[in-house]
């Protein structure tokens, strides 16, 4: 009695969930049961669906994927994949299918599936990708090319002091917008899982020396201690992390204070520390600085200068390499930002 009641409840639940729930016969791929959501999703009545085979409502190009997934059922694997289905009115709906097989003596006899309408997620992804390409082509590229003209202009106005000041101010502002755009695009790529590394065996020591050299116009003392073993990493991205951390160390400490780049080799990875003796970071802010742009509290914003995407990006780059990035800091005494890069993938 109790069993019957709980079976009825399950039936009612399946009938009323928002996702299409269905079963199909394994051999013929004919629908053997469907719920109300399946009717809404496909536009067909229950009766009509029960006279259809799966491939009748799937565009040709998706059939190989579905066949492959059905094949996996022999290995008792549940599958989740995305395809489109053809509705009764001919329109296509993107769906996420999660399916599993029901077995009789280890032989699959029926497939139990759930189809979720993912139209709004797909639309959002499309809008995001249009937005990224708009920012890249309509903002970032013109800005980068405009930046190339400024040094030429600078040469021409060198004798006129006031104009030179204008050009330099313009250049500083444009470089700052260009950096923000680059960071913003990086964050977008990371968020949609499209961030890729180009890894090869590299000498981190050379990168550190190169980055230290870049900072020579600041006249800061930046010293390297220790030497790194070779790692398998993306040189441009590691350079980006180091540049960001050193640039912060310069920004948040006084001119007369030195900056140390400490390198040690552990069993499986290189550890690089960027140490400054500047203002330091309060304990309660130490975890927040890595995802500043997600923060909603206003309190910290007062103490944070800049746009705050840098550390988030650095941490993501290091994470993609299989390493970690963290900070040790005492307010008023300085901070050390550490990150690790594994020797192997
Ligand atoms: P930005 O410097 O552009 O704000 P970051 O993501 O690089 O962006 O840094 C986020 C915040 O972390 C900074 O605004 C600052 O408050 C804090 N911070 C980062 N590095 C240091 C440092 N070396 N010393 C003190 N505070 C730091």
Image (cartoon, rainbow, N blue to C red):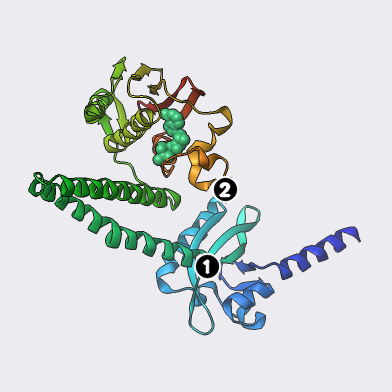
Of mark 1 and mark 2, the one earlier in the sequence is 1
Would you say the residues marked 1 and 2 are in contact, meaning their CB atoms lie under 8 Å apart? Answer: no
At mark 1, the secondary structure is helix
Between residue 36 and residue 113, name the one nearer to us: 36
Q: In which quarter of the image is residue 287?
A: top right
Between residue 77 and residue 267, name the one nearer to us: 267
Q: Is residue 11 above or below residue 327?
A: below
Seen at 53% across and 57% down, the residue is 80
**Mark 2 vs ligand 1: CB below 8 Å:** no
Q: In which quarter of the image is residue 25?
A: bottom right
**Which of pointers 1 and 2 indicates the residue nearer the eye?**
2
Look at mark 2 in the image and give the residue it sits on: 296
State the mark number for residue 243. none
User: Picture coordinates of residue 166 (x, y %)?
Assistant: 21, 49
Query: Which residue is most to the bottom?
Result: 89
Image quadrant in which the C terminus is located: top left
User: Picture coordinates of residue 31 (x, y %)?
Assistant: 61, 73
Left/right of residue 123 with respect to residue 134 in the rendered view: right
Query: Which residue is most to the top?
Result: 226
Distance in Å between CA atoms under marks 1 and 2: 26 Å
Between residue 9 and residue 318, name the one nearer to us: 318
At mark 2, the secondary structure is loop
Between residue 234 and residue 304, name the one nearer to us: 304
Seen at 56% across and 70% down, the residue is 29
Splitting the image into four quadrants, where does ligand 1 fall?
top left
Q: Is residue 90 above or below residue 16?
A: below
Image quadrant in which the N terminus is located: bottom right
Seen at 58% across and 65% down, the residue is 116
Q: Is residue 310 above or below residue 181?
A: above
Look at mark 1 in the image and give the residue it sits on: 120
Left/right of residue 113 with respect to residue 172 in the rendered view: right
């Amino acid at each position: 009695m109790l069993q019957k009641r709980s079976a009825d409840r399950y039936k009612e639940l399946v009938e009323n969930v928002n996702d299409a729930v269905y079963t199909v016969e394994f051999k013929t791929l004919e629908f053997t049961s469907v719920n109300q959501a399946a009717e809404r999703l496909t536009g067909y009545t229950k009766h009509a669906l029960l006279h259809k085979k799966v491939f009748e409502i799937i565009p040709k190009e998706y059939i190989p994927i579905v066949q492959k997934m059905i094949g996996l059922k022999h290995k008792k694997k549940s599958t989740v994949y995305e395809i489109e289905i053809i509705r009764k009115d001919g329109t296509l709906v993107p769906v996420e299918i999660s399916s599993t097989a029901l077995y009789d003596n280890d032989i699959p006899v029926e497939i139990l599936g759930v189809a979720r309408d993912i139209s709004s997620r797909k639309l959002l992804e499309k809008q995001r990708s249009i937005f990224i390409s708009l920012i890249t082509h309509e903002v970032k590229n013109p800005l980068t090319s405009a930046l190339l003209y400024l040094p030429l202009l600078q040469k021409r106005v060198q004798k006129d002091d006031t104009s030179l000041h204008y050009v330099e101010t313009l250049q500083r502002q444009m470089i700052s917008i260009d950096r923000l755009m680059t960071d913003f695009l990086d964050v977008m790529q990371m968020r949609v899982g499209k961030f890729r590394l180009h890894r090869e065996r590299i000498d981190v020591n050379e990168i550190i020396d190169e980055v230290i050299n870049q900072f020579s116009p600041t006249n800061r003392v930046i010293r390297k201690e220790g030497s790194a073993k070779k790692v398998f990493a993306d040189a441009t991205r590691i350079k980006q992390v180091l540049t960001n951390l050193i640039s912060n160390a310069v920004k948040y400490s006084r001119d007369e204070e030195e900056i140390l780049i400490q390198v040690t080799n552990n069993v499986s990875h290189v550890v690089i520390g960027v140490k400054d003796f500047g203002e330091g970071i309060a304990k309660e802010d130490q975890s927040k600085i890595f995802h500043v742009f997600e923060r909603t509290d206003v309190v910290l914003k007062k103490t944070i200068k800049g746009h705050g995407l840098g550390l988030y990006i650095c941490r993501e780059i290091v994470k993609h390499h299989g390493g970690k990035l963290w900070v040790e800091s005492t307010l008023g005494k300085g901070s050390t930002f550490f990150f690790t890069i594994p020797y192997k993938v």
